Image (tube, helix red, strand yellow):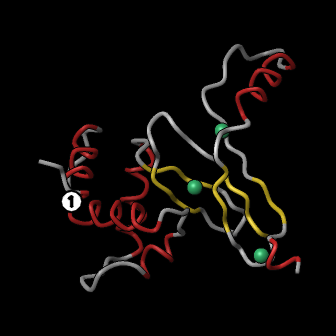
Amino acid sequence: MRKSKKEKHADLLRAHGLKMTPKRLQLLSILARIKRPLSAHEILKNWSQDGTDVVTLYRALEALTAASIVRRVNLQHGHADYELVTPGKHHHHLVCTDCGTIENIKGCPGDRTEKSVLRKSTRFSSIREHSFEFFGTCRACAA
Ligand SMILES: [Zn+2]
Ligand SMILES: [Zn+2]
Ligand SMILES: [Zn+2]
């Protein structure tokens, strides 16, 4: 029998030693459905009738980010955006600075960069992760 999205999310929480709560499950289901980085405000807009408050939402986001289930992305919108982590895989984003359109970039250009950063470093012997995004103008805005 195939597991539902909800069961998979419950497993995910369990695997990271996090308590399964309806709010955490709903947060994961919103991020899984919309598939792009969302601000806390956008997450709240997609929350079902029963609602949640900002404080609870931020606590859930923090717990999931600390467990590496969710990743915090800085798209220079003046706030953090959040998206689901795909284990063993990550991607970067192209962001239109005029309209905010976001495109996921397949593949990571970072591995080579890490090597060259390490070569230039005098104090570091390893890099665990990196974070960078690309900013520009989308075709619709350029037209
Ligand atoms: Zn993304
Ligand atoms: Zn644009
Ligand atoms: Zn990367």
Residue 29, picture quadrant: bottom left
- The answer to whether 139 appears left or right of 126 in the picture is right
Residue at the extreme left of the image, as rendered: 1
User: 11 or 63: which is nearer to us?
Assistant: 11
Q: In which quarter of the image is residue 98?
A: bottom right
Callout 1 crowding tier (Cα within 10 Å): few <14, some 14–19, many ≥20 = few
Residue 37, image x, y percentages: 55, 62
Q: Is residue 54 left or right of residue 19?
A: right
SS type, badge 1: loop
The image shows residue 86 at horizontal and vertical percentages of 45, 44
**Horizontal arrangement in the rendering, residue 84 relative to residue 106 (left or right):** left
**Residue at mark 1:** 21
Quarter assignment of residue 45: bottom left
Answer left or right for 9 relative to 74: left
Which quarter shows the C terminus?
bottom right
Q: Measuring 79% from the left and 79% from the top, which residue is drawn there?
A: 140
Above or below: residue 86 compared with residue 126 = below
The answer to which of 71 and 102 lies nearer the viewer is: 102
Residue 89, placed above or below residue 40 = above
Residue lying furthest front = 1
Q: In this view, does 65 lie above or below 98?
A: above
Q: Which residue is drawn at 69% across and 69% down?
A: 78
Residue at 45% across, 53% down:
84
User: Where residue 49 sits: x, y (%)?
Assistant: 27, 86
Q: Nearer the viewer, residue 34 or 73?
A: 34
The quarter of the rendering in which ligand 3 is drawn is top right
Residue 94 at x, y = what percent?
73, 58
Give the residue at x 84% y 69%. 137
Q: Is mark 1 within 8 Å of ligand 1?
A: no
Amino acid type, callout 1: Thr
Q: Which residue lies furthest to the bottom in this view?
A: 49
